[in-house]
Amino acid sequence: MSEKVSSQDKIFALLSALAVASEPLTARVLAEQTGMPLSSTYRYLATLMRWSMVQERHSGQYAPGPMAVQLAAGFEQHNSVLTWARPLLSELAVRTGESAALMMLSGRRALCVEMIDSVQALRCCYQKGHSQPLLRGASAKALLAFADETLLGTVMTGLKAEEQTALQTELAIVRAQGYAVSEGEIDPTIWGVSAPVLSSREHLLGGISLMAPAERVGPAASQWIRWTCEAAQRLGAMSY
């Protein structure tokens, strides 16, 4: 990690790594993932533990702490976009019979902040709180296409020149049509469509995504895309 990165950024880098990890991580693994010296990693972890943002297991592994629960509760209670989105997601899920989600940017990832599951036995297994990198899937690309160009530049770091060109071309198409569609990019059996939620000032607030088993989509795709875009537009119109 660069010496120019602030201490605050390093602390949040550790938090982010723990938040997206599928299991508790050791300080050594965290140091490797964030590019920090091991001594600095221990020092910042100690600060986070004092604030209950991180907790240490007996095995010397670290995981998010109890303060994360309070942060999540505050987000749920005070985020107006989430509040307004819930009835729209429920309506979309009922109309299509499939799973609908509200996605938001979280650093360099697309985070599911709300999910209304399909009532059908065979359905997408995506869950609230799950996140994914911004390079694959309709949800990620709908957000990335309308995000700040600085984020796009950061996400493309490390990609080969031809990969960058291909991604920029794909995102230009997403911006032109107003939605992203994918099939099998993350899960080989899942089809998805996502439309950005833009405020009246064209500020990206998030994205509404519809996910379904690919075998169930067929000729319904065009109507499902239209309904998803309409839901995103209605949510954006509620925000000033």
Image: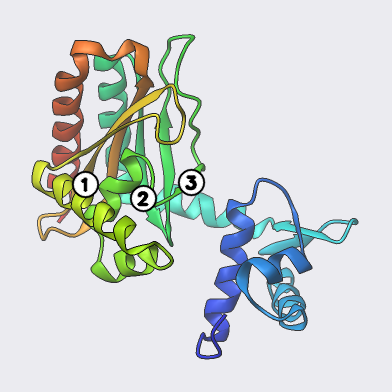
Q: Secondary structure at mark 3?
A: strand
Q: Secondary structure at mark 2?
A: strand
Depth check, front residue: 66 or 227? 227
Residue sitting at x 19%, y 52%: 169
Residue tagged 1: 197
Badge nearest the viewer, 3 or 2: 3
Q: CA distance from mark 1 to mark 2?
A: 9 Å
Q: In the rendered image of this protein, does residue 101 appear above or below residue 152?
A: above
The crowd level at tag 2 (other Cα within 10 Å; few <14, some 14-19, many 20+) is: many
Residue 240 figure quarter = bottom left
Q: Where residue 87 appears, x then y in whole percent? A: 28, 30
- Identify the residue at the far bottom of this view: 4
Depth check, front residue: 61 or 64? 61
Q: Amino acid at mark 3?
A: Ser
Q: Where residue 80 appears, x then y in whole percent? A: 30, 49
Depth check, front residue: 109 or 231? 109
Q: Amino acid at mark 2?
A: Met
Residue tagged 3: 131
Residue sitting at x 24%, y 12%: 218
Task: Judge left or right: residue 101 versus residue 43.
Answer: left
